[in-house]
Amino acid sequence: MNHKNNDDILNEIKYAIGTNKTLEAMPTLKPFQPFDEEIISYLNALSKDILKNKEAKVYPDVITFGFWCRKASINIQKKAYEHTIHKRYGRGVAFHIAPSNVPVNFAYSMVAGLLAGNANIVRLPSKDYQQVDLILESMERTLKDPEYQALRPHFCLIRYGHSEKITEFLSALCDTRIIWGGNQTITAIRKAPLKPRAIEINFADRYSMAIIDSDQYLKATNKEKIARDFYNDTYLTDQNACTSPRIIFWMGNNINGAKEEFWQALNTIVQDQYTVQGVQAVSKLATLCKLGATHEGIRRIQTKNNLIIRVALENIEKDLMDYRSNSGYFMEYNLETLVELLPLCQSQFQTLSYYGVDLKKIENFIKENRPQGIDRVVPMGTTMDFELVWDGIDLIERLTRFVKTNV
Amino acid sequence: MIDYNQILNIPPYSYRKKEKEDFLTAILGELTKHHYQKSPLYKRMMDTLNFNPEAVIKSYQNIPFLPVSLFKELDLKSINDDEIFKTMTSSGTTGQAVSKIYLDKETASHQQKTLVKIVSNFTGSSRMPMLIIDCSSVIKNRAMFSARGAGILGFSIFGANKTYALDDDMNLNLEVIEAFLEKHQGKPIFVFGFTFMIWQHFYKELKKQNIRIDLSQGILIHGGGWKKLKNEAVSPQAFKECLNDVCGITKVHDYYGMVEQTGCIYMECEEGHLHASIFSDIITRRPIDFTPCDIGETGIIEVVSILPKSYPGHILLTEDEGVILGEDDCPCGRLGKYFGIHGRLKNAEIRGCSDTYESQK
């Protein structure tokens, strides 16, 4: 590529933070070591700015991100890495491609890049979100503080349309490329070559399930909170995030009683806060009919309306996830032992969330059976909580170089 | 069993609410049992939906509806493969899944007869010279019987001296049109085509070339939907006025119908309302719980038809939205429900982690 071509390409990029100059200078920057004090201090300032912003208060996802960036919260995450931090350095330039329909994901990806010590180019979601703007404004305000001047060269937050040329240009420039799914996007972007020593981190399409112990659930005194947690895991993202449970497994001795109370409590929240559009209602019915037509023993469990669709399964079959739906469509199965899950534990299985089930049991199940899937086992209500280890990938480890020194 | 020969002789707009409901409930209940016995996939779906066809059915409104998209993904039929007479497909664009509708001779023949009953209520029963606003090649490829080809062939029985107004490149074939009009001067003429084709390749061309032809004796029947014309902000009223402007035509009837229930079309009357005949019906349903809407309330359209016997398509939930305007009291005099279509259900912007690059259209 000659210089003039590069200029043409660069001129098509719209910068939310950064300039062409920032971008071009990135490969020459010195990387940080992971969890650098200056960066932790910046994130703490960013957190303060977000949390004091009145406009941000209406967006729980923005507030959650604000809390996530606090010094105390980062220092907890830091602990897991303390024994190797002093040998690790950022890989260089990280190019993040954020998903178009999860507003705050870009910010977590960016922060992971910073914490690992990289300079970051982030392609923002193509759709307009108030959440994105609020976080960008806070980032910009915080960078204006003279104390954090030195960090500015590590920030390029950009937007561009469907331009293969720009993707190729940025791919050729970066040391790590991070694509936040799904499969089609990964296939499309993979056509753009990376530098020989560059690596890629891809978050492909995944699906998730939940498991509830009926006896523990019935004992619980905070059923409203449990319903709220489950609502946040599902309806908050139209049950369409990779972390949203699509099948609910029930264990224990009082399954029928637990189901009744659980769905009743959920219905109270859903009826108050969720609306189902015609397309969603029709699509849930179509998925149910398709599943029923092609599998034995599928029964719809009557619910009050189309907000919650419940589907009782008689058998666990390998292809059940081809018949998953969203916007409030739950397959249910009564589980005797965890081993019954195995046919579903394919590599696409991401998060198993649980309520009242002994975590040790699940850990042992994974140890004994070593399934290809299940990368996260987390309590109900926390499926969306971002962690530096995501989808089985340790972002700090992947985004750094380990410098080996021998005596 | 259902005596179609007798039924299809009943005048198509002759039943009032109660009579029609009893009539449809009896026949659709029979059909539901029939498909339950003949189609294993249908049986499993009814079982999934906890519906027992052998139990007393109070109203056809209570029989489960199948989303119409299932015909794209499942091979739904209630006949053996050697009884398939023809397979109809919807006209999807390349790469899209198409509906596959399996017909035996009996069902195909009932479709044709029903179409005649319905349409001749508007055109009269004598055959008229027919001008088709399309090209002849769409019906030549019989291998895949598309909805467009099927529509033209289906309506062809109302016409004599069938003439195609467009050449294979969809250009206006003026010479042919003029010769046709000269030959049939002063006589009533039957004009047929698809709404968008008529607009794009007939009206716009005549307008552009500043040509006026005389179709003042014509009756135009058109269907296929308003999606593309909506994008061009052309209302049904404007469509009629514009056509009148270039060819003097005054009788223009839209129809609503789908390949999954061929034959039972819903014709637009002189008042601009779509009408359900006794051979079929529409119910509008609420997204929240699929309960039936009131008159005047917009909902998802369910269509029922007494014709589908070779495939379980007698009770379907469409992806269209519309409103029932009234029942048994349209000023045009036809009994039954009359309604309007608003178009496709709006696509929901579903959240969650899907693709960074939205599908590029």
Image (cartoon, coloured by chain):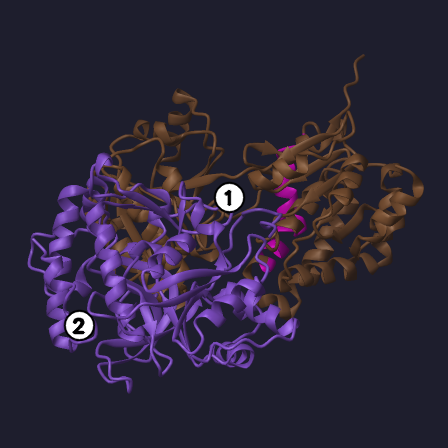
Chain colours: A brown, B purple
Residue flagged by tag 1: what amino acid is it? Gly
Mark 1 is surrounded, within 10 Å at the Cα level, by few (under 14), some (14 to 19) or many (20 or more) other residues, namely few
The answer to whether dots 1 and 2 both sit on one chain is: yes
* Residue that label 2 marks: B11
N-term mark: 1 or 2: 2
Host chain of mark 1: B
The residue shown at (20%, 37%) is B80
Give the magenta-colored segment's residue range: A62-82
Residue B101 higher or lower than B322, as above or below: above
Q: Which mark is residue A15?
A: none
Residue A204 vs A146, above or below: the answer is: above
Please give the name of the residue rendered at 32% of the width and 60% of the height, measured from the top-left corner.
B157
- Quadrant of res A331: top left
The disc at residue B95 is 1
A159 left or right of A287 in image: right
| Mark-to-mark CA distance, 1 and 2 | 42 Å
- Decide whether the magenta segment is chiefly helix, strand or loop: helix
At horizontal 65% and vertical 34% (from top left) the residue drawn is: A201
* A80 relative position to A170: left or right: left
- The stretch drawn in magenta includes residue A66: yes
Looking at the image, which residue is at 47% across and 29% down? Answer: A347
Query: What amino acid type should be assigned to the residue bearing mark 2?
Result: Pro
Tell me, yes or no, whether the highlighted magenta stretch contains residue B145. Answer: no
